[in-house]
Image (cartoon, coloured by chain):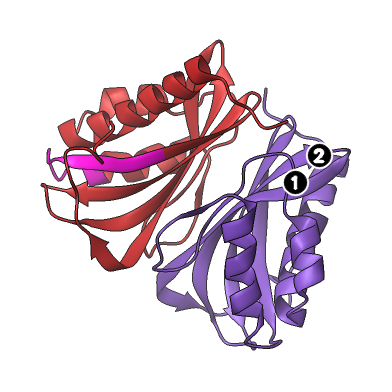
Chain colours: A purple, B red
């Protein structure tokens, strides 16, 4: 069924925002917290081979976040709900530059919380101007 | 819960293979058939802005497949099951060249069939040699 649940959609958007907040703040504890514990996780960083499993995925984030904070935002997030799973597409910008990556973020409900199970980001051929209005997170 | 259901995993792998078979054969009918009807669908083609909804996603495939058949394979597929949703990561090669894209394919169970709801492919910084063994589909 096409899921149209505004409250769940908002909850998924909040989870998506929490991801970019942790990324921006280079806050490894928060990043670790928001990835799923029980479901299988995976990650496709731009250009890189796939990572599977919490240890490898979180180790990759530890290394990325060691680079320090910056402003990473997810613009124009669009949520698809599939029961206890959800998918968000958005465009990623850093430091208020035009968005240069397109991303897929996948979440599952674990103990009533939307936790991340997958992230892929890949380059846009043409960077996208960002506007206040498009910055929904 | 970590889902370890070999039969469902195989069914998802078959759905993933069907996607690359339709892509390779430039078979629009089969491509249309394997995308979800009831759930929201989306697609992030390499470098391109996000597409949402069956009409836009399928129109993009119609245009891509108009280019004619070729050998597109998904290598080293790895399945994560989340109840009635599933996610596959794999590497895409065309015409037996080293794999040059990493992909996320998301499926949901609709009427007992795993149907695609999302596809993202993005370039690998370093192309991956492909072997017969890695070609699981």
Please give the name of the residue rendered at 17% of the width and 56% of the height, measured from the top-left corner.
B98
What x and y, as percent, mark residue A131? 66, 79
Does the image show residue A130?
no
Rendering quarter of residue B35: top left
Q: Which residues are magenta?
A: B64-77
Q: With A27 as the anchor, is A42 left or right in this view?
A: left
Residue furthest front in the image: A55
Q: Which residue is mark 1?
A: A37
Does B70 appear in magenta? yes
Give the residue furthest to the top: B112
Q: Is B4 left or right of A39, judged from the image as shown? A: left
Image side of residue A12 versus residue A62, left or right: right
The tag earlier along the polypeptide, 1 or 2, is 1
Q: Nearer the viewer, residue A45 or A52?
A: A52
Q: Residues within 10 Å of mark 1 (few under 14, many from 20)?
A: some
Do the numbered discs 1 and 2 sit on residues whose CB atoms are within 8 Å? yes
| Residue on which disc 2 sits | A110
């Amino acid at each position: 069924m096409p899921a149209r649940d505004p409250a769940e959609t908002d909850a998924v958007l909040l989870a998506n925002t929490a991801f970019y907040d942790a990324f921006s703040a280079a806050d490894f504890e928060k990043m670790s917290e928001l990835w799923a514990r029980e479901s299988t996780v995976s990650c496709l960083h731009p250009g890189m081979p796939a990572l599977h499993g919490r240890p490898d995925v979180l180790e990759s984030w530890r290394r990325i976040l060691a680079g320090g904070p910056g402003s990473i935002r997810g613009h124009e997030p669009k949520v698809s709900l599939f029961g206890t799973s959800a998918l968000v597409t958005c465009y990623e910008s850093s430091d208020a530059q035009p968005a240069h990556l397109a991303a897929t973020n996948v979440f599952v409900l674990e103990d009533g919380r939307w936790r991340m199970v997958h992230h892929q980001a890949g380059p846009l051929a043409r960077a996208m101007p960002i506007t206040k209005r498009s910055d929904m997170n």
